[in-house]
Amino acid sequence: MFKIILEDLRTHREGILAQGFWAVLVYRLAHARRGCKMPVLAFCWKILNLCLQKMVEVATGITLPEYATIGRRLNIEHFGGIIIHGATVIGDDCVLRQGVTLGNKRNDQPLDAPILGDRVEVGAGAKILGRVRIGNDALIGANAVVLCDVPAGATAVGVPARIVERAAAPVLADLEEMRDARF
């Protein structure tokens, strides 16, 4: 557990001062409690963790329930307005920005929650709703509302979200030409 917490700490640029790290740390501690075999200790740990979770929610605006399944090195870039459903699954090395909601879309299906693959980046204000799968290395644009699956490596933008092709990144030679043209 401590190795994973250290990975989470290194993932956040501000280190121990990062509000996103606070939320992930409390999640990791709560998740570890679920393996405790001593009922009295587990109960006390649960009460302490509920208090910590509420304090983090109030201080940061991040709701990260212990029943969600979170991979390694989750990076919450900016704090505030981040809601994660308890049945959500998030893979390794994912990035969430402010205002992100990962939740269900229908009251009659309360356990339908998103599944994010590895290395998924979710832009500010994006909403991923319902039982949708987001493939590895996908990008979700800012303020996108995702209601259907996004394939691996794809970019989804808009309301409702649609898949767009990624622009090719300029190669080093192109960047040098651009620099030389400016000077």
Image (cartoon, grey):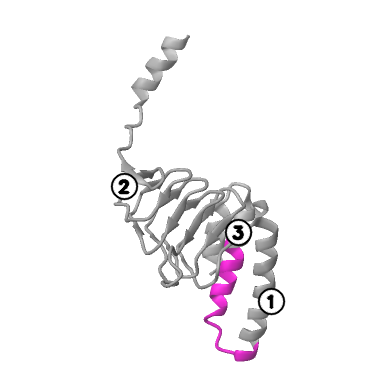
Asked if the residue at tag 3 contacts the one at tag 1, i.e. Cβ–Cβ closer than 8 Å, the answer is: no
Please name the amino acid that badge 1 sits on: Leu
Q: Where is residue 68 in the image (x, y as percent from the top left)?
A: 48, 69
Asked if the residue at tag 3 contacts the one at tag 2, i.e. Cβ–Cβ closer than 8 Å, the answer is: no
Query: For mark 1, what is the residue?
Result: 48
Magenta: main secondary structure: helix
Q: How far apart are marks 1 and 2 (CA)?
A: 40 Å
Query: For mark 3, what is the residue?
Result: 62
Q: What stretch is highlighted in magenta?
A: 24-40
In this rendered view, identify the residue nearer to me: 88 or 76.
Answer: 88
Q: Distance between the residues labelled 1 and 3?
A: 18 Å
Q: Are there few (<14), some (14-19), or many (20+) residues within 10 Å of tag 3?
A: many
What is the secondary structure assignment of the residue under circle 3? Answer: strand
Please name the amino acid that badge 3 sits on: Ile
Query: For mark 2, what is the residue?
Result: 153
In this rendered view, identify the residue nearer to me: 168 or 177.
Answer: 168
